[in-house]
Amino acid sequence: MSLKNNHEQSTTSFDTKERIFKRAAFLFAEKGYKDVGMREIAEGIGIKAASIYNHFDSKERLLHNLYKFYIDNWEESVPDLDELLEMTRQGKVSQAIQTLNFNFGQDRLDIMEAIAIIAISRINSDDMSSKLLACHRHFKEDYIEFLNTLIEMDAIEPIDVETFTNVVFTYITGTTLTNSSPLKISKENKNAALNMIYSLIKIKPTK
């Protein structure tokens, strides 16, 4: 077989694996992990059921890969709080606060939301779901600490940080779950609402 044919075969295999990956994420989120079989995933992308095992040896392995994808992308995307504090010291308070409202980019947003829905629905079913959602809990704790530090630095007006943070995280979780239903919220409307929430934070003039 030529190098060209080898490359084409490798590319096709990668594309198939990615299609399986995405199809599984959306089916698991829509119907529930337990109610989706490997055959249904394969049929959804037009391949034979047996072929799916060339890429993932079990449904459990497929779920594990979805969770790993989420955690890797979360760790890559979540803002570094030390960097945000440095921005604040440089007088870039507004930029630091805006950076808190991070996202995964439109190319990954839908699948990240789908995987989050899977984990939420399986929170008491396996350790990986708990580990994934722990990312959110730890970030929430850092988020609260950061806003309290801004108040201590006299960079923003005092605000009930815990309540504000609960509003932000409840809204984000709620829109994620809503987007798994027909009542989808567009990225534009979601961001507009978040901007309204963030307008509750009043930045003090620099002295």
Image: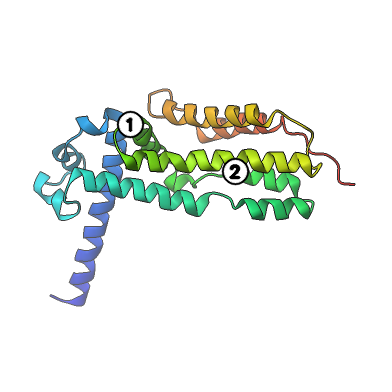
Alpha-carbon span between mark 1 and mark 2: 24 Å
SS for dot 2 = helix
Disc assigned to residue 142 = 2
Please tell me which residue lies in front, 45 or 104: 104
In this rendering, would 162 be left or right of 171? right
| Colour theme | rainbow
Please tell me which residue lies in front, 136 or 18: 136
Q: Residue at x 35, y 50 (%)?
A: 68
SS for dot 1 = loop
Disc assigned to residue 124 = 1
Mark 1 or mark 2: name the one nearer the start of the chain.
1
In this rendering, would 125 be left or right of 53? right
Please tell me which residue lies in front, 131 or 206: 131
Q: Position of residue 94 (x, y in %)?
A: 73, 44
Q: Position of residue 206 (x, y in %)?
A: 86, 46
Query: Mark 1 packing: few (<14 Cα in 10 Å), some, or many (20+)?
Result: few
Q: Is residue 43 visible?
A: yes
Question: Which quadrant is home to the N terminus?
Answer: bottom left
Amino acid bearing label 1: Asn
Q: Residue at x 17, y 36 (%)?
A: 37
Q: Residue at x 27, y 44 (%)?
A: 63
Q: Is residue 101 visible?
A: no
Amino acid bearing label 2: Asp
Q: Residue at x 35, y 39 (%)?
A: 129
